[in-house]
Structure formats: structure tokens, C-alpha cells
Image (cartoon, rainbow, N blue to C red):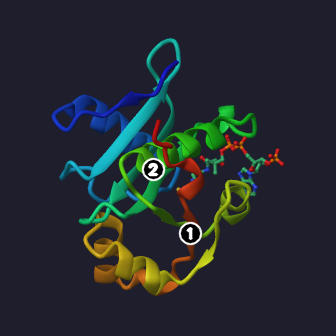
């Protein structure tokens, strides 16, 4: 099924995504206070069950994108869905002008390395994306010091001028 963007006013889709991300043990930061800089998508199966999600949040100047909420239902993993979901967020962020992608991941570093990410300084991430929901949450709770950051330039994904 095609990825469906979650509209800010779509409370049902937001609730579905919240339950899906909670099951995947990913952060729910910001899901209840949508902003135009936070974009999220879900993938559903034929009966409407969420089987994948992806998204990102832009910095205020639009130059940086924090990739987030990339998850695949356990039964659908290791068949390329996660890479497709991640690439969707990266390509959309690049198309909207972002030059650099960042993310937090403690468990899935090798997955992100296959997508071109390298280890990054978590404080550099927080400095580039200070207003994002995840950075604000992790700063407030002290979790930032325990997080693992990754980054990737987006130059290869930026649309070329005709
Ligand atoms: C991480 C996740 C999205 C990967 O989804 P997936 O559909 O299994 O990913 P893919 O099939 O596209 O895997 C691409 C490659 O990464 C590897 N890979 C996937 N997850 C990995 C992990 N956690 N650790 C190491 N390698 C991993 C795959 O083996 C595959 O390698 P290959 O190209 O050599 O075959 C999925 O495991 C998941 O939802 N995890 C829980 C949520 C999460 O941690 N999300 C990331 C933080 S935002």
C-alpha cells in the first residue's frame, strides 16, 4: 500500500501511529502537538492495520531534518520495508530543502549505516535541531546523554534543477 501522510487533524490515524510506535518502543514525543515541521506517514496492510511508519522533523531554518518514527511491524521485517520507509523520509526532507539528516538510534546503528549514516556528536545534533520534540524531551529528562546520534548529508538526494 502507498504511504499515507498523517494529517494534523486526523486524531484516529495519530492514535494508530501512537500505538504502533509504542509497540516498537520508539518515542511518542510531539505526536500530540503536530506542527507543520513534523511530517509523519504510515503504511497499512489490506485491512488497515499499521505495518510501517516513517517521518522527520525539520529545524526552524529548514536546513536540518531529524529522521524519526521509522518502524516496521515485526512480522514484516528484514524484507526491505525499513529501508524503503527511511528513504522516503530522507527524500522528502531533501525535496523540502533539508541539507543534512540526523537521528537518534541506540539499537539500529548498522541499519542506518547501510543507508549512509555515520556516527555523530549528540550535542551537534541537539545544536542543529534544538526545537524538535525529541531533543526537547531528551534534554528535559536527561536522556540526551545516553542517546546515540547519527547523521548523513542529503546532497545526493536533493532534486536537481531542470
Ligand atoms: C530498524 C527497522 C526499521 C528495520 O526494518 P527492516 O524492514 O527489517 O529493514 P530492512 O529489511 O530494510 O533492512 C536493511 C538492512 O539492515 C539490516 N538491519 C535491519 N535492522 C537492523 C538492526 N536492528 N541491526 C542491524 N542490522 C539491521 C538488515 O539485515 C538489512 O541488511 P542487508 O541489506 O544486508 O540484508 C526495524 O527492525 C524496526 O522497526 N525496529 C524497531 C524500531 C526501530 O528501532 N527503529 C529505528 C529507530 S528510528
Please identify the quarter of the rendering in which residue 121 is found.
bottom right
The x and y percentages for residue 103 are 50, 65
Residue 36 in the figure: left or right of residue 87: left
- SS under mark 2: helix
What residue appears at the point 47 percent right and 35 percent down from the top-left corner?
162
- Asked if ligand 1 lies within 8 A of label 2, the reply is no
Assess whether mark 2 and mark 1 are in contact (beta carbons under 8 angstroms). Answer: no
Q: Earlier in the sequence, mark 1 or mark 2?
A: 2
Give the CA distance from mark 1 to mark 2.
14 Å
- SS under mark 1: strand
- Above or below, 43 against 65 in this view is above
What residue appears at the point 40 percent right and 52 percent down from the top-left corner?
56
Q: Residues within 10 Å of mark 2 (few under 14, many from 20)?
A: many
Pick the residue in front: 86 or 138: 86
Can you identify the residue that label 2 sits on?
A: 94
- Above or below, 34 against 72 in this view is below
What residue appears at the point 42 percent right and 49 percent down from the top-left corner?
93
The x and y percentages for residue 144 are 43, 81
Residue 26 in the figure: left or right of residue 60: right
What residue appears at the point 29 percent right and 51 percent down from the top-left corner?
38
The x and y percentages for residue 45 are 53, 19
Can you identify the residue that label 1 sits on?
A: 151
Residue 17 in the figure: left or right of residue 45: left
Pick the residue in front: 115 or 13: 115
Pick the residue in front: 97 or 37: 97
Amino acid at each position: 500500500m502507498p504511504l499515507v501522510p498523517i494529517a494534523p487533524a486526523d486524531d484516529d490515524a495519530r492514535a494508530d501511529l501512537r500505538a504502533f510506535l509504542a509497540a516498537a518502543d520508539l518515542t511518542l514525543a510531539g505526536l500530540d502537538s503536530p506542527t507543520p515541521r513534523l511530517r509523519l506517514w504510515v503504511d497499512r496492510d489490506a485491512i488497515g492495520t499499521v505495518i510501517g511508519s516513517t517521518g522527520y522533523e525539520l529545524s526552524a531554518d529548514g536546513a536540518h531534518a531529524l529522521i524519526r518514527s521509522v518502524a516496521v511491524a515485526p512480522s514484516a521485517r528484514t524484507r526491505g520495508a525499513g529501508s524503503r520507509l527511511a528513504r522516503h523520509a530522507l527524500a522528502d526532507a531533501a525535496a523540502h530543502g533539508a541539507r543534512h539528516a540526523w537521528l537518534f538510534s541506540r539499537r539500529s546503528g548498522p541499519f542506518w549505516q547501510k543507508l549512509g549514516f555515520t556516527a555523530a556528536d549528540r550535542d551537534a545534533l541537539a545544536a542543529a535541531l534544538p526545537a524538535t520534540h525529541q531533543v526537547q524531551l531528551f534534554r528535559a529528562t536527561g536522556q540526551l546523554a545516553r542517546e546515540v546520534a547519527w547523521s548523513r548529508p542529503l546532497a545526493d538526494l536533493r532534486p536537481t534543477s531542470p
